[in-house]
Amino acid sequence: MTGPSVVTLDIGGTTIKGARVGADGRELARLDRDTGASLGAAEVVSRVRGVARELADAGTVGVGLSVPGIVDTAAGIARHAVNLGFRDTPLAAEVAAEVGVPVVLEQDCRAAAVAESEIGLGRDARDLMVVVLGTGVAAGLIVDGQPLAGADGSAGELGHLPVYPDGEDCACGQRGCLEVYASASGIARRYAAAGGTLPGATAADVASNLDSDVVAARVWREATETLGLALATATLLLDPALIVLAGGLTGAGDTLLRPVRAELQKALAWREAPPVANSPLGGSAGRLGAAILAWRAAGYEDVVLRDAG
C-alpha cells in the first residue's frame, strides 16, 4: 500500500520545481518544468496543475505551493506576481480541482522562513527573519513562531525599503531601495554602469574579483553597506533572534557575511546585533516550507521533514 505523501511546488519566474515528499522527509519523485510565464497567467496555472497532477499518486494527502509576490494565504489567492502575470489568481482552488486534496498557497519567502524555523538554523528561534538575496530582495518573517503576512499579504518587502531616499531610481517607482543596490541583478547592473571591465559580469563575478578590480570592490562595498543598514532598520523594528540569508548571493560565503555583519553592528549604537548566517537549506527552502505547510493542511502535524537536497 502506498504511504502518505505531499506534493510541493516552488513556482519561480522561469521554473516550476516540484517534488513528492514522503512522511520521512524523503523525496519520492522530482519534476522540474518551465513556468511558461511569457505565455501568460493562464498558461502558468495550466502548467502548475499539470505538474501537480504528474507528481501526485494514490497516497498524496496534500499539496503545498510556494509563489513570489503578494499572497492571500487564507484565501489561497495569488494577489499579485509580476513575473508570473498573476492578479487575484485562485491558484489553490485551481490545483485542488486537479488533484482532489487540500492545497495550501504561501508566498515564497514566507515558505522559506517556515522551513528555516522548522528544520533550518531557526529551530530554536521564535522570532526569525529570512532574507532572500536573488534577482530581487525580500524577507520572510517568523514572529512568535508564526509566519507574518501583514494586512494585505505583503509583509517582508525588504527590497523596497528606501535605504537612501535620494538614491538611485528603483523599478518600483521609489528611489534608493535596497534592491537597487544589494540584489544580484542590481549589483551586476551597477558594476556595468560604473564602467566595470568584466564583460557580462554577474554578481558572483563581482564578488570573485574584489582584490583585483576597484570597481567590483566599490560596488560590493556599497551593496553590503546598504544591506547592513536595511537589516539594522529591520532589527530595530522586529527584534529578530536570528537573521538568515538565503538566495544566490549567499554563494559568496564570508565575502558577504563578514561585511554585512560589520555594517549591521556599526549601525546599531546601543544594542548588540542579532546573529547573521547563511542558510543551510539553499535553494530548497521554499519547496521544503511548502511541503511542511502541506502536511499541516492535511492534518499531519507531527511529520518532521529533513532537507532532501
Image (tube, grey):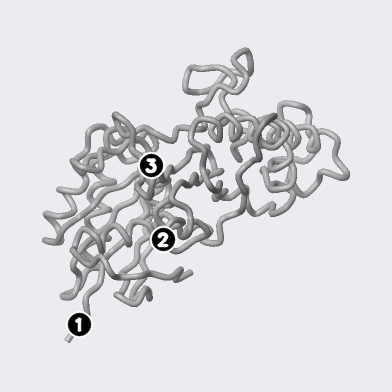
Q: Residue at x 16, y 58 (%)?
A: 102
The earlier-in-sequence mark between 3 and 1 is 1
Q: Residues within 10 Å of mark 2 (few under 14, many from 20)?
A: many
Q: Report x, y in % for residue 107.
A: 35, 44
Residue found at the far right of this picture: 212
Question: Mark 2 belongs to which amino acid?
Answer: Glu
Disc 1 on helix, strand or loop?
loop
The one nearer the camera, 93 or 246, is: 246
Is residue 130 toward the left or the right of residue 153 in the image? right
Q: Is residue 161 above or below residue 289?
A: above
Q: Report which residue position mark 3 lands on.
A: 68
Q: Nearer the viewer, mark 3 or mark 2?
A: 2
Three-letter code, disc 3: Pro
Residue contact between numbered discs 3 and 1, judged by CB atoms under 8 Å: no
Q: Position of residue 169 (x, y in %)?
A: 58, 18
Residue 256 on image: x %, y %: 70, 46
* Vertical position of residue 302 compared to residue 99: above or below: below
Q: Quadrant of residue 218?
A: top right
Q: Which residue is mark 1?
A: 2
Instruction: Using the numbered discs, state the Cα–Cα distance from disc 3 to disc 1 in whole angstroms.
Output: 32 Å
- For the residue labelled by badge 3, is the local secondary structure a helix, a strand or a loop? loop
Q: Is residue 207 left or right of residue 71?
A: right
**Which tag, 2 or 1, sits closer to the chain's start?**
1
Q: Nearer the viewer, mark 2 or mark 1?
A: 2
Q: CA distance from mark 3 to mark 2?
A: 21 Å
In the image, is 273 to the left or to the right of 216? left
Please state which of residues 51 and 144 is positioned toward the viewer in this rendering. 144
Q: Which residue is the site of mark 2? A: 118
Query: Dot 2: what SS?
Result: helix
Q: Earlier in the sequence, mark 3 or mark 2?
A: 3
Above or below for 58 versus 283? below
Q: Of all residues shown, which one is farthest toward the top?
A: 166
